[in-house]
């Protein structure tokens, strides 16, 4: 092919791409960039087409049209396909910014990921911006290395005292892994201070992993210490209080952190309510009446007074008295006796973390706001990667260290 034919080929492709050019932003600079980019890509295609390397190995086959999308403009590009002279396999040469299987240019993918993760723009808005489906945006966002996303906020200049509170809990989410169902464990921690009984200087840590996997206490305590040292100050200079539901692993973690464990009032009162203030029925009314008639002890009044005044020490004393007085009595049904015995064991182990500690970690509320609200809107089961992408693309999940394990 002579020089004139080569020029005709260039002009034909250039006119085709320019005629398909759509500007999302009618800015003269953006249009200048778009035209120069088109010319550059066509030149790369032509240089490859007439190169000795191509001619020695591949023969021309056909032409395909690819849509090239950038944030501010979109255009069509003719791309020639070739066949291997020996194997007859198809081969396509893609110029810079273009790749197989995606109309989103490589340089734009990082920008899209930043839109989703850092700027918290919804997938729908990003898809509309690039005129592609939400599925394509999902795929690009899920290519992020999600092993660790850190957006913790530094509060070193905003400390109100030397007390740090850490609320800890976990929840389980159903998910799909290939064709099998599995449960994901999401371990959630809130690190904060209290000022006039209000939460301030809040940071969060979220661990996402299959329920079959475990995170060692040493690994988790190291992560917590590093987060506090980096964003609040020297870890050893703080009084650390760990609030949770009394699970063994949380108490062990409290020891590893050399902190004070507190059974948060939400979990204590829920346990207490399950036995004492559960829904009234004939059997339970008879139970209360029998206690008061046999002993003359106005148990209901004392429980209410201690409960309303948050006198946890007195509540524990009442529980112990009920159990010692009525454990062998016919008044308690087997179920009530079991529930009361279970509550006594639970509270006696955690007594030091209840009395004089009217604190709540509010962790249940955080799990509802940040996790269940996002994932429980439908009965759909997502893969772990999709769940991670959904949680990352949430305006409410800020000041958070997210760690994932597969």
Image: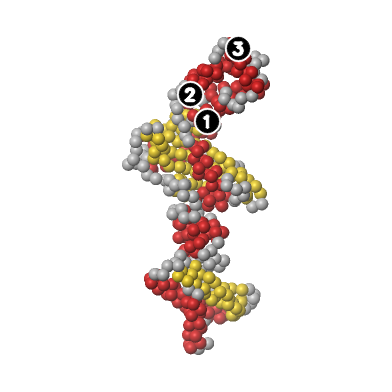
Q: Residue at x 59, y 73 (%)?
A: 91
Seen in the picture, residue 177 relative to 252 is either above or below; the reply is below
Q: Secondary structure at mark 3?
A: helix
Q: Residues within 10 Å of mark 3 (few under 14, many from 20)?
A: few
Q: Is residue 258 in sight in this rendering?
A: no
Residue 78 versus residue 303 in the image, above or below: below
Who's the residue at 52% across and 57% down the image? 124
Spatial CA distance of label 3 from label 1 is: 31 Å
Question: What distance separates the C-alpha of mark 3 from that of mark 2?
Answer: 24 Å
Q: Which mark is residue 293?
A: 3
Q: Nearer the viewer, mark 1 or mark 2?
A: 2
- Contact, CB < 8 Å: mark 3 with mark 1? no
Residue 267 is marked as 1
| Residue 330 drawn above or below residue 279 | above
Q: Which mark is residue 120?
A: none
Front in this rendered view, residue 196 or 257: 196
Residue visible at 46% across and 57% down in the picture: 115
**Which residue appears at 46% of the width and 47% of the height?**
396
Q: Upstream in the sequence, badge 3 or badge 1?
A: 1
Mark 1: give few (<14), some (14-19) or many (20+) Cα within 10 Å.
some
The colour style of the image is: secondary structure
Measured as percent of width and height from the top left, residue 16 is found at 51, 78
Q: Is residue 206 above or below residue 47?
A: above
User: Dots 3 and 2: beta carbons under 8 Å?
Assistant: no
Under circle 1, the secondary element is helix
Q: Which residue is mark 2?
A: 308
Q: Nearer the N terminus, badge 3 or badge 2?
A: 3
On the question of residue 183 being in view, the answer is yes
User: What's the distance in space between the residues labelled 1 and 2, CA to CA?
Assistant: 16 Å
Query: Which x, y percent locates residue 97?
Result: 48, 68
């Amino acid at each position: 092919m002579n020089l004139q034919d080569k020029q005709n080929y260039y002009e034909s492709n250039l006119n085709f791409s320019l005629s398909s050019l759509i500007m999302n932003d009618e800015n003269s600079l953006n249009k200048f960039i778009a035209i120069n980019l088109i010319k550059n890509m066509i030149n790369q295609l032509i240089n490859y087409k007439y190169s000795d390397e191509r001619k020695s190995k591949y023969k021309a086959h056909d032409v395909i049209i690819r849509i090239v999308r950038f944030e501010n403009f979109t255009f069509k590009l003719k791309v020639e396909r070739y066949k291997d002279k020996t194997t007859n396999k198809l081969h396509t040469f893609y110029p810079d910014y273009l790749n197989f299987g995606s109309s989103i240019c490589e340089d734009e993918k990082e920008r899209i990921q930043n839109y989703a993760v850092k700027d918290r723009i919804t997938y729908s808005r990003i898809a509309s911006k690039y005129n592609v489906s939400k599925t394509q945006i999902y795929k690009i966002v899920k290519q992020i290395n999600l092993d660790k996303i850190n957006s913790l906020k530094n509060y070193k200049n905003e400390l109100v005292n030397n007390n740090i509170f850490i609320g800890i809990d976990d929840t389980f989410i159903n998910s799909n892994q290939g064709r099998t169902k599995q449960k994901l464990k999401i371990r959630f921690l809130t690190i904060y201070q209290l000022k006039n009984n209000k939460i301030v200087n809040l940071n969060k840590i979220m661990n996402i992993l299959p329920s079959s996997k475990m995170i060692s206490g040493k690994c988790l305590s190291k992560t917590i210490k590093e987060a506090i040292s980096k964003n609040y100050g020297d870890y050893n200079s703080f009084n650390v209080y760990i609030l949770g539901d009394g699970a063994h692993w949380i108490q062990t973690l409290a020891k590893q952190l050399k902190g004070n464990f507190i059974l948060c009032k939400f979990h204590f009162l829920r346990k207490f309510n399950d036995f004492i203030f559960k829904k009234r029925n004939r059997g339970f009314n008879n139970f209360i009446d029998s206690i008061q008639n046999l002993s003359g002890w106005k148990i209901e009044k004392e429980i209410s007074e201690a409960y309303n005044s948050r006198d946890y020490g007195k509540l524990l004393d009442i529980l112990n008295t009920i159990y010692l007085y009525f454990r062998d009595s016919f008044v308690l049904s087997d179920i009530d006796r079991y529930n009361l015995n279970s509550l006594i064991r639970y509270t006696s182990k955690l007594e030091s973390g209840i009395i004089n500690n009217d604190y709540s970690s509010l962790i249940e509320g955080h799990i509802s706001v940040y996790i269940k609200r996002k994932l429980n809107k439908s009965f759909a089961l997502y893969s772990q990667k999709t769940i991670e992408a959904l949680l990352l693309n949430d305006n409410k999940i800020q000041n958070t260290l997210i760690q994932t394990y597969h």
